[in-house]
Image (cartoon, rainbow, N blue to C red):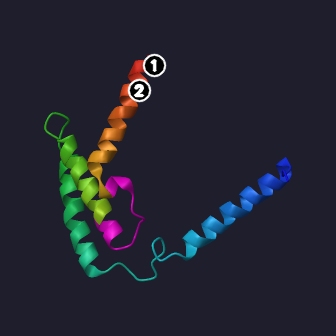
Amino acid sequence: MALTNPERQKLHHERIKQKLADAATSKRYVTDAAPSSVLVEKLDVLFEQLFAEGLKNIATMSPPTVAYLALQIERLLVEHGVMPESRRSTDPQAHAKSLKARQTRRDKKE
């Protein structure tokens, strides 16, 4: 039995609502606890390094250092359950390869 377009749309919206409800109640995305002092101390060190890198001029700053610090911050937040895990936080090389592949495809089109 084939569904009509309005029926398919309704079914699709119900699935989306269910996924959002599941994500909202999941401990992976929601934390009730206040940030621990350990997390604050670790973030403070990383942010200080990041701000120090940001104060440098374009000739002396290091984009890989900024990327590394951002990745460390993301991993720390994932570890403490503040944000969901991403592919970038588990395998940064795979993320870099996908970006490079995307750029290569874009260059071939031009």
Secondary structure state at the residue bearing disc 2: helix
Position in image of residue 110 (x %, y %): 44, 16
Q: Which residues, given as a range, are shown in magenta?
A: 76-89
Q: Is residue 48 left or right of residue 2?
A: left
Q: Is residue 85 left or right of residue 26?
A: left
| Amino acid type, label 1 | Lys
Position in image of residue 107 (x %, y %): 39, 21
Question: According to the image, label 1 marks what residue?
Answer: 109
Residue that protrudes farthest toward the left in the picture: 60
Q: Are marks 2 and 1 in contact (CB under 8 Å)?
A: yes
Q: Eyeballing the image, is 84 above or below 40?
A: above
| Amino acid type, label 2 | Arg
Q: Eyeballing the image, is 89 above or below 54?
A: below
Position in image of residue 9 (x %, y %): 78, 53
Question: According to the image, label 2 marks what residue?
Answer: 105
Whole-Å distance between the Cαs marked 2 and 1?
6 Å
